[in-house]
Amino acid sequence: MGKIIFVLMFIGSICQGEEKVKMSKTFEQNCMLCHTKEQIPNKLMYRRYLMKYSSNTRMKEAIFTYLKNPKKSNSIMPPPFFLKFPMCKKLELGDDILRANIKEYLDYFDLKKHLILEK
């Protein structure tokens, strides 16, 4: 299973499609504004979550847990990551809004949307 995911990620990184997914304003303001400003490698983070949790449901719960209590011990990223990039600040968002933003983050960086299959 891990090999299949790795191959899909490799193909996805090579064949990045031109299709852009629109971001909602709340997602853009709550998440991507800081991620863009700090130049956080979102695709790398998405791949790490995918490799460890392998399903959207498990990834959503892991990200939700981290964002509710952002600590290095709750993060999937290795400690050297935080030497270069800042720790996420605790977001004062309702659970529903936070879950919607997590879903949008996962949809935005979903590898399947970047695969180009021959017809």
Image (cartoon, rainbow, N blue to C red):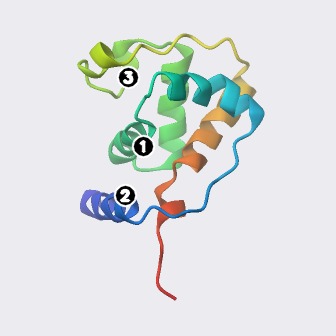
In the image shown, does 76 or 24 lie closer to the viewer? Answer: 24
Give residue 57's quadrant in the image.
top right
Residue 96 horizontal side relative to residue 75, left or right: right
The residue under the point 23% across, 19% down is 80
Looking at the image, is 111 positioned above or below residue 109?
Answer: below
Residue 13 on image: x %, y % = 37, 57
Residue 95 on image: x %, y % = 70, 23
Residue 103 horizontal side relative to residue 26, left or right: left
Q: Nearer the viewer, mark 3 or mark 2?
A: 2
In the image shown, does 95 or 84 lie closer to the viewer? Answer: 84
Q: Amino acid at mark 3?
A: Ser
Instruction: Name the residue beneath numbered marker 3.
Output: 75
Q: Secondary structure at mark 3?
A: loop
Residue 32 on image: x %, y % = 59, 30
Residue 49 horizontal side relative to residue 83, left or right: right
In the image shown, does 54 or 38 lie closer to the viewer? Answer: 38
